Amino acid sequence: MRNKRIWEIVFVGLCISILSFLLLGSTRAESPTYDEVTYVEAGYQFLLNRDFRFDPFNPPLAKEILAIPTLINKNVIYDPVIFWPRVVVILFTLTLAVLVYIFSKRLFGDMSAKLSLILFIFEPNILANGHYATADLIFTFFLLLSLYCYWIYRKKFTLRRVAIFSVIIGLFLSAKLTSIPFLIIPLLGLYVLDYKNKKDLIKWPFWKKRIRPILLFIFIVLITLWGTYFFKMEPPLGYRFDTHRQAIALAKNNQVIRLLLTVPVPLGSYISTIKQFIMFNSKLYIKRSYFLGMISLYGISGYYFPVLFLLKTPLAELLFFFLSLYFFYKNIKRDKYILFPLFFIFFIVLFSDISLVNRYILPVYPLVIIYAGQIINLKIINKKLRYVLIAFILIWFIGGTVSSYPYFISYANEIAGGSKTGYEYFVDSNYDWGQGLIALKKYQDKNNIKNLQLAYFGSIDPVRYGIEYEKIKNLSINDYKKDQALKYDKNHTIAISATCWYFCGYYKNLNFKNSKPVDIVGGSILIFKINE
């Protein structure tokens, strides 16, 4: 037993070491993505000045966590790879890996846990978002932690367990607003499914016995949530930089709106954030997206997410998952803790038409991985043959992931033709999020490129990396050079971020119409040479 325990620790330690190596390698290779610096700067304002105006669309916890290194040295924001904020996310990713292992082991056994851990450390979507200084991985961690705590406490919720669970749920709600539909509703559903005599749920005596823990739960959740705002009181419609807001005009003739704009209350910022989130997901905001050859200004609903998931997820991982679903579907009493929230998340996003990207459903990946891991327990195949087949599939899986190193964000599976053609199906943070400037600088130096024309999608000025270029029409928010006209001659190299390729209209340019990029740099920047 002792030797088994030692080998288990060695195995987990080796997996964590491999995961650390891959994440740190990507961190060093990629320039900050479009949102990272903004997230860290907002978190810095949250921590230092308690000013929550810098990001009114989501609760503050994830950004506060990202900004912790800025309290020691503010200049980490201006690091070319914002290393320390990214390291914070990497620590969460490593902890999430251990949590996946523990959860899988308790649900499906030792071998399933080992397979799930291997799948996790080579999952390209986890590797992509597991080192970026954004909220997605932190949100994913708290979702799985909440689900795990519910699972281990479900048989008996003592007051102590209620208190612990309440704090975790409060932190989860503080990470991202999608926490409410993604988990709170599924947890209520699981509670109903777990209760044996469901008729009691509509009777007063059932709830009378539980008033005390329910009130304790609500109180601790709200206090934890408010604590992430440092117990600051603000108006429900929030303070904003914009003095020309429509609400201000409406307040002149509406006493209620005037009160909502001026009277501070507990969790006023959170209420305001919910309002902003609802507005953002309406038709009031342009949410430009590209998918499968179609550009939309207001998002694409229905088929978008399922198809995107099938193109961005390794086929080997999908194979393990669907085989597990086929052979173990009868174990619903046990598997519902994974499948119910997983399918509910997909159900929710089917009806969303915001500018969706795969990272928004990042929480489904640990759930898919945990469930897929149980395929190793399949009894209908001889044990040795089963392990050999799984080993071959894992080699295929790992090879596909490693081939996209260090630009895991650009990963696309074989259906989409791999990373080199992924941009033909999707862009933005599904493929090109501004991560390629470091690689572009190396490419320019290696090929001695003197006349470079660049259309960049991102929030970092390419000049910071020493890139010499002429700016052409782009989507950069911090490049203040004047746009130059495209030069179609053999002396110029044209570099176009994949997102700019579509949203700036280059894909319609007759000079590029029938040509393929001669190279793709940083997993995201298309390189063209015009032959005369």
Image (tube, rainbow, N blue to C red):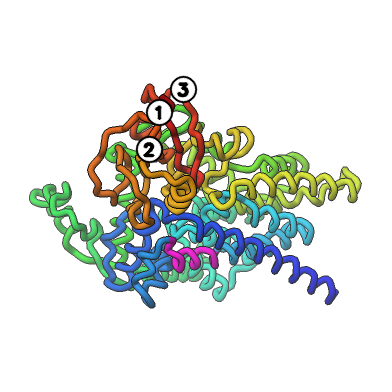
Is residue 516 visible in the rendered structure shown here? yes
Q: Nearer the viewer, mark 3 or mark 1?
A: 3
Question: Cα distance, mark 3 to mark 2?
Answer: 18 Å
| x, y percent for residue 196 | 66, 55
Secondary structure type for disc 3? loop
Give the residue number, with chain letter if any, for mark 2.
500
Quarter of the rendering occupied by the N terminus: bottom right
Which three-letter amino acid code belongs to the residue tagged 2? Cys
Q: Would residue 282 be counted in the magenta stretch?
A: no
| Residue positioned most to the left | 252
- What label sits on residue 164 in the rendered view? none
Secondary structure type for disc 2? helix
Give the residue number, with chain letter if any, for mark 1.
507
Which three-letter amino acid code belongs to the residue tagged 3? Asn
- State the residue in front, 216 or 314: 314
Q: Mark 3, residues whose alpha carbon is within 10 Å: few (<14), some, or many (≥20)? A: few
Tell me the chief SS of the magenta region.
helix
Q: Mark 2, residues whose alpha carbon is within 10 Å: few (<14), some, or many (≥20)? A: many
Question: Cα distance, mark 1 to mark 2?
Answer: 9 Å
- State the residue in front, 516 or 24: 516
- State the residue in front, 183 or 372: 372
- What label sits on residue 514 in the rendered view? 3
Residue at 36% of width from left, 41% of height from top? Answer: 451
State the extent of the magenta-drawn residues as a range: 81-92
Q: Earlier in the sequence, mark 3 or mark 2?
A: 2
